Amino acid sequence: MAPLDFEIWLNHFEHHARHPRSLQPEPASQLPTDERRRIARSMATFQLGEQSEGRGFLKAAEDFARARDTPAIVRIVELLIREEQRHAALLLAYMQEQHIARARGNWTDRCFRRLRRLAGLEVYLQVLVSAELIGIVYYRALAAATHCPRLQLLCRVLVADEFAHVGFESQLLLSLCSTRTPRMQTLMRLAHLAFFLGTAGIVWLTHRAVLRRAGYGAIGFLRACRAQYAFYLEPVSLPPSRASVQATRRMPAS
Ligand SMILES: [Fe+2]
Ligand SMILES: [Fe+2]
């Protein structure tokens, strides 16, 4: 990743830190009981996933910054973690309005946290970007599964931030991967894709009540997640004359 790219991302996250997202305080309109029951546990699990001190991520970024002389990455990661904590706070505030209990622990969340600690920045990013890409599809589905405009707005706010997170993480991941041999790149990509699809399958199984309500069967959900993965992590190389086509490439629907 070029120094200019780090500068662009740093400006982006600094701007967001100065203008944090918020929801207007409004009198809470209570969710119907069946809808509340359907989303409560699922939403609490995602709230837990957003909530992290990010010490492992920060440590990996610090090691990377020292090794590659890219100090800006530490501040970017610090601000990104803060934005995730803001997501956790926004979700928690909504859950409290709706008297939804927070999750104290969840096996999928524990697996993600342990996996992220396994190695350096590259593995950390692979695990994180997987969660974020699946999160984009999930939050869109949650918005479609509810009639509450306040929850729909919250989901849109989260998705908008996640697009930027995934943009930064995928750009960094692709640039790290490009330093490896072509054979190693293929192996790593296949391993990451298998992990990603396995994780998306588990998310469908554990959140299927919400996802089904949004119109997703297992295959449809995996397809939507796969499309996000392809858009960010399998960029198409086009000859320069077709660069403008690539620039206007449409976002995948989910
Ligand atoms: Fe988030
Ligand atoms: Fe994120």
Image (cartoon, rainbow, N blue to C red):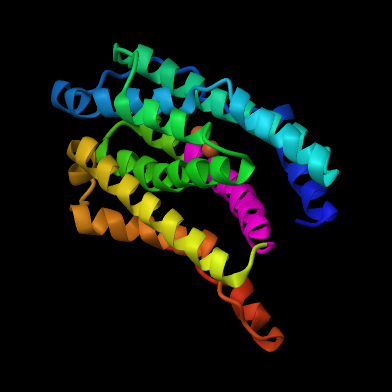
Q: Which residues are magenta?
A: 157-179
Q: Is residue 51 left or right of residue 143?
A: right
> Residue 154, can we see it?
no
Q: Quadrant of the N terminus?
A: bottom right
Q: Position of residue 172 (x, y in %)?
A: 66, 52
Q: Residue at x 62, y 59 (%)?
A: 177
Q: Is residue 119 magenta?
A: no
Q: Position of residue 147 (x, y in %)?
A: 26, 35
Q: Residue at x 37, y 12 (%)?
A: 96
Quadrant in the rendering for residue 190: bottom left
Q: Residue at x 82, y 37 (%)?
A: 66
Q: Quadrant of the C terminus?
A: bottom left
Q: Is residue 91 left or right of residue 234?
A: left
Examine the rendered structure and indicate whether residue 95 appears above or below residue 189.
above
Most extreme residue toward the left is 34
Along the line of sight, which residue is nearer the eye, 137 or 6? 6
Number of marks in the rendered image: 0
Along the line of sight, which residue is nearer the eye, 148 or 166? 166
Q: Is residue 241 left or right of residue 229?
A: right
Q: Position of residue 221 (x, y in %)?
A: 27, 53
Q: Main secondary structure of the magenta part?
A: helix
